[in-house]
Image (cartoon, rainbow, N blue to C red):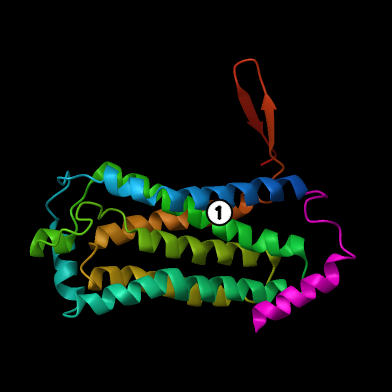
Amino acid sequence: MRVAVVVLLLLATTAHAEPWHKGRYGKNRIVHLSIAASGMALYIATGPLEDRLMADECRWCHPNALDVAARDALRWDKTSTAKTLSDFDAYGLTPLVSAGLVLAGTLEEPSTAALIDDLVPILESTMIARWASRSIKIAVGRERPDSHFLGVTDEANVSFPSGHTASAMSVAISAAVVARMRGYRSEPYIWAAGTLAALSAGYLRIAGDRHYLTDVLGGAAIGTAAGLTVPYLMERNLAVTPTRDGIAVAGAW
């Protein structure tokens, strides 16, 4: 229902507002919308390639004492339930809560430009976090806990970092930063509810025996870094200039 209200208000106001691709931040919107959309599309399209690049043998095989203790304390008996809940949390609940609360702020002064300014940084943060976690997973080749202790062979050597946690934290943190930049009253609720939901996804990955504690902490660090950094790029005037040796990127910071 809220989404329908946003769409109706946008249709009502767009005719009288400056086009989203013009004005002070118009070029930046085009750049970041293109990066977010193409980056996410490429990430999805190259999914099968990830399976081929995964390490056949673990490069990081043995857990440390902290990870073993955390696994023993947090692992559920019904790991399949925890894994299902982690999927729902990371890719459903956290984005719904975080982006929904941002949209609640967007409703105060709705426009196509405001919608892009509010949602594109969240999408771009998530895209960057997913690419970073995928690349590190392939490079590190850490064995998953359920593979190490139980012999499970499904995606056995891509434990570090936790992609679910990286994705969830990038959504929650970027949404909170966007709300802070815009002065939305929903900001404290995003920091509280969004971050809690994201951290719960990390906990459920441990409970599902798919990740160690350090995997979750690594994913949280990646997601937090992306969420804190990317939204501010939407406020900058970046310029790509040809040079004799290639290209140069300049901007105001």
Which residue, as the protein is rendered here, is positioned at the far top? 244
Image location of residue 250, percent across then percent down: 67, 33
Disc 1 residue type?
A: Glu
In magenta segment, residue 21: yes
Q: Which residue position is annotated with label 1? A: 124
**Which residue is at a point 70% across and 39% down the rendered structure image?**
252
**Which residue is at a point 66% across and 77% down the rendered structure image?**
3
Relative placement, left or right, of 136 versus 178 is left
The quarter of the displayed image where residue 176 is located? bottom right
Which residue, as the protein is rendered here, is positioned at the far bottom? 1
Q: Which quadrant, please, contains the N terminus?
A: bottom right
Relative placement, left or right, of 20 versus 239 is right
Residue 191 visible in the shown view: no
The quarter of the displayed image where residue 168 is located? bottom left
Tell me: residue 230, above or below residue 67. Answer: above
Could you tell me how many numbered marks the image carries?
Answer: 1
Nearer to me, 64 or 249: 249
Which residue, as the protein is rendered here, is positioned at the far right? 16
Give the magenta-colored segment's residue range: 1-24
Residue 84 visible in the shown view: yes
Image location of residue 56, percent across then percent down: 17, 45
Image location of residue 128, percent across then percent down: 48, 50
**Which residue is at a point 48% across and 60% down the rendered structure image?**
170
Image location of residue 106, percent across then percent down: 71, 71
Q: Which quadrant, please, contains the C terminus?
A: top right
The quarter of the displayed image where residue 249 is located? top right
Helix, strand, or loop for circle 1?
Answer: helix
